[in-house]
Image (cartoon, grey):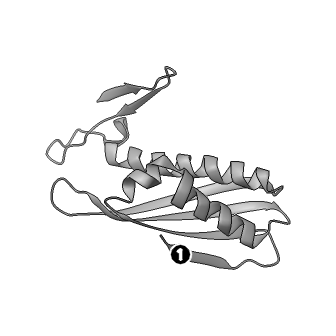
Amino acid sequence: MFVGRDSYGHIVVAGSWSDNDPDFQEWKAIKPSDLLLIGLASCTAHDVVMILERQKQHLTALHIDVKGDQLPQPPHAFTEIHVYYTLNGVNLDRKKVARAITLSLDRYCSVAATIKGVATISHGFELVGLEDDTTGDQSS
């Protein structure tokens, strides 16, 4: 297991896992590759919230699921990553939400910009609790 500390002193515990040790508990720490997906989700979440606030959108909840496909052989690089946003709010404008997500993934999120050099990032979103409850899926 390893402990990482950011520039503000916050820590995260990461580790590896063993297929050969029957007593090993995988949940002892986060897989480093999962940290990359969590980093992408938190980076784009911050952007989307900030952009929607500037657009005077009343967002009340945001949930992001990120799934990544990795190569079967070492170094198990990600080839495709899908980011799915579930947003709840008061009278959210579907076009403004789509624009906020696109701006985040294409312009502002440093993690997405780094990953795009290696993997394809696609995305979709859903507005929950609204009359128009359709989804939008896209690739970038």
The outermost residue toward the front is 107
Q: Amino acid at mark 1?
A: Gln
The outermost residue toward the top is 9
Q: Is residue 7 left or right of residue 70?
A: right
Viewer-nearest residue: 91 or 14: 91
Q: Is residue 62 left or right of residue 78?
A: right
Q: Quadrant of residue 102?
A: bottom right
Residue in the image at 25% along x and 40% along y? 16
Q: How many marks?
A: 1
Q: Does 129 appear above or below 32?
A: below
- Residue 55, given in percent of the width and then of the height, sits at 79, 57
Q: Does 103 appear above or below 29?
A: below
Q: Does 46 appear above or below 135?
A: above
Residue located beneath label 1 in the image: 138
Task: State the SS at label 1.
Answer: strand
Q: Is residue 3 left or right of residue 108?
A: left
- Residue 45, given in percent of the width and then of the height, sits at 60, 51
Q: Which quadrant of the figure contains the N terminus?
A: top left
Viewer-nearest residue: 104 or 83: 104
Residue in the image at 73% along x and 72% along y? 95
Viewer-nearest residue: 82 or 107: 107
Residue in the image at 82% along x and 77% along y? 131
